[in-house]
Image (tube, rainbow, N blue to C red):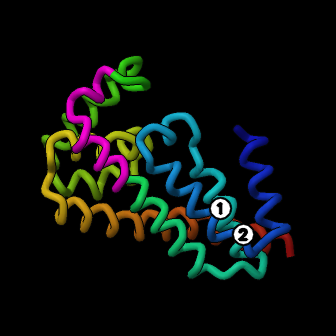
């Protein structure tokens, strides 16, 4: 995984124009139920946030791309849960990891729409909460409001961690 992330960072460093679409894809993958369990992209997103702090890459396009990727990843996960319902419990990868669905189910039952917002900030929950929200047919608009509000905040936090970290290291080395 480390070499995968390093290759992405190196590519973005050399091809800054590709940063927004790459960040979009990383955030989508980090939020989409099936991909996020196997390809944790948050480290690459933090590192790209670090590039924002020390290069010519602009924050705003990266932030919007990360936010939209994360929001759309959850939206697709919600839609899959809505369409497949509880049949998803018997499909890979959840058939091999049923504890993920049960934890997401308990979380959604306890927190409701707020759980969509909160779940964005916790890796294992980020992968299943939107899917479970779809399975239980959480109302569409409340889900989407929580989804996109949390996506924009999450993207800002992840990118700013990298940006401030790189700026702090630059300041320390000077």
User: x and y percent of residue 66 in the render?
Assistant: 52, 66
Per the image, the residue denoted by label 2 is 18
Residue at horizontal 62 percent and vertical 59 percent from the top: 46
**Residue, far top:** 96
Judged left or right of residue 90, residue 68 is right
Which quadrant of the rendered structure holds the C terminus? bottom right
Against 2, residue 118 (above or below) is: below
Q: Where is residue 8, by image quadrant?
A: bottom right
Inspect the magenta stretch and tell me whether residue 33 lies in it: no
Inspect the magenta stretch and tell me whether residue 89 lies in it: yes
**Residue, far front:** 83
Judged left or right of residue 105, residue 100 is right
- Badge 1 vs badge 2, beta-carbon distance below 8 Å: yes
Q: Nearer the viewer, residue 170 or 136?
A: 136
Residue at horizontal 15 percent and vertical 41 percent from the top: 136
Judged by its main secondary structure, the magenta piece is helix
Answer few, some or many: residues within 10 Å of disc 1's Cα (few below 14, many 20 plus, some between 14 and 19): many
Secondary element at image label 1: helix
Which quadrant of the rendered structure holds the N terminus? top right
Residue at horizontal 69 percent and vertical 69 percent from the top: 19
User: x and y percent of residue 72 in the render?
Assistant: 41, 60
Per the image, the residue denoted by label 1 is 22
Residue at horizontal 53 percent and vertical 62 percent from the top: 158
Number of disc labels: 2
User: x and y percent of residue 169 in the render?
Assistant: 76, 67
User: x and y percent of residue 118 in the render?
Assistant: 30, 54
Judged left or right of residue 130, residue 69 is right
Magenta residues, start to end: 75-90
């Amino acid at each position: 995984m480390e070499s995968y992330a390093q290759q992405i960072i190196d590519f973005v460093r050399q091809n800054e124009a590709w940063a927004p679409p790459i960040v979009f894809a990383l955030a989508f993958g980090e939020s989409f139920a099936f991909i996020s369990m196997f390809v944790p992209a948050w480290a690459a997103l933090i590192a790209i946030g670090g590039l924002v702090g020390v290069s010519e890459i602009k924050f705003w396009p990266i932030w919007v791309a990360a936010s939209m990727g994360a929001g759309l990843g959850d939206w697709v996960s919600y839609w899959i849960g809505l369409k497949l319902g509880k049949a998803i419990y018997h499909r890979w990868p959840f058939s091999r990891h049923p504890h993920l669905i049960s934890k997401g189910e308990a979380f959604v039952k306890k927190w409701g729409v707020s759980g969509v917002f909160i779940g964005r900030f916790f890796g294992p929950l980020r992968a299943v909460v939107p899917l479970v929200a779809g399975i239980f047919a959480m109302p569409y608009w409340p889900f989407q409001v929580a989804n996109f509000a949390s996506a924009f905040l999450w993207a800002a936090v992840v990118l700013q961690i990298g940006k401030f970290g790189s700026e702090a290291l630059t300041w320390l080395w000077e």
